[in-house]
Amino acid sequence: MGTHIQWPRFALAALLSTVFVIVVAFVWHGHVAAPMYADFPSRPADQMKALFPFLVLTFLVEIPVFCYMYLRVYPQRSMANAAKFGLWAGFFILMPNGQFWTGTPGVGWDFLIMEIVQGVVTLILAILLFQAVYRPADEAWTPPTINFARFLPWGLGGAVLVFVLDYPFHQYLAPMLFNEYPAHDYPQRAPETARMIELFATYLYQLTCFCYLYLRIYPRRSMGNALWFGAWLGFWVLIPNAQIFVAEDKYTWHMLAIQFPEGMILTVIMMFYFELAYRPRGSVGYATAE
């Protein structure tokens, strides 16, 4: 790869950023914003306590990968670029929160805004902490050029493709294929029009960003790289599902075990489509740097 990483320093900086995110999440959601969870269908406290090690594990995977992607996306590293990445990529990470919110009873727009703002601010601070501790050197290569006039139609098309496959799967197909999907007592609400528009918007942003990250992280484009990226980033973007699983009552392991492979299959399908449709060219400058 063209990105040079000093792994011991990277591991230390990423671990500190992960601990920071965990502490802020615990303090914010458990204490500062606790009144906003009064009507949220929360798990009983003893169940959440038992799942806490699993929650920590999700952050230990999520935040180091977030830091790694920053190094792959921005060859010129600075506090300004770190903050920029934390803003748009942090918003990208939080799209599953907006998707779950659509069908969650007891929470309104103020709850969604609180989650998104707190999450994005925390991730900006986390990547700034990573930048300050790791102090990565600039790379010799330049970011690949992206023709947005061509990229946006195909990227948005991929997002629409996933939406029209994913929504019917969860609403109609999965309940027919699997017992207790969702669990019979899982708290749900029928989303109104405004929430459905919000849901569709989360897919547009999340999956267009997904395609954009592919172009930035894999300048040497190929079908193999596209499918591999769809698999591993498809797993990574579902980590918020696992974090919501810890917090939400009646959200079962069975449901989570169905959502992960289904989501990864959809992102692999999307990347297959995107690689064929967009036909991205490899970056000569990056290849030379390698």
Image (cartoon, grey):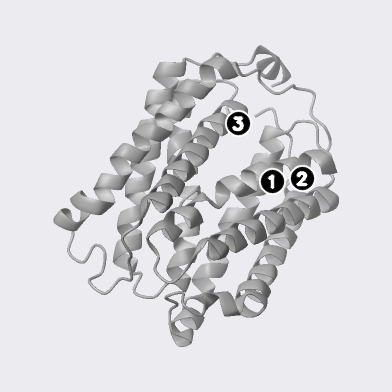
Is 102 rendered above or below residue 282? below
Residue 32, percent from left and from top: 67, 77
Residue 143, percent from left and from top: 70, 23
Q: Residue furthest bottom?
A: 46
Answer yes or no: do the residues labelled 2 and 1 have beta carbons within 8 Å?
yes
- Residue sitting at x 55%, y 35%: 209
Question: Which is more toward the observer, 288 or 21?
Answer: 21
- Residue sitting at x 51%, y 80%: 38
Residue 30: which numbered mark, if any? none
Q: Residue furthest front?
A: 193
Q: Residues within 10 Å of mark 2 (few under 14, many from 20)?
A: many
For the residue marked with disc 3, what is the amino acid?
A: Ile
Is 12 rendered above or below residue 163? below
For the residue marked with disc 1, what is the amino acid?
A: Leu
Residue 45, percent from left and from top: 48, 85
Q: Tell me the residue that label 2 is attached to.
A: 83
Label whose residue precedes the other's in the sequence (3 or 2): 2
Quarter of the rendering occupied by the N terminus: top right
Q: Secondary structure at mark 3?
A: helix
Tag in front: 1 or 3:
1
Residue 217: which numbered mark, if any? 3
Residue 256, percent from left and from top: 35, 61
User: What is the CA distance from the residue labelled 1 to the residue labelled 3?
Assistant: 18 Å
Label whose residue precedes the other's in the sequence (1 or 3): 1
User: What is the CA distance from the residue labelled 2 to the residue labelled 1?
Assistant: 6 Å
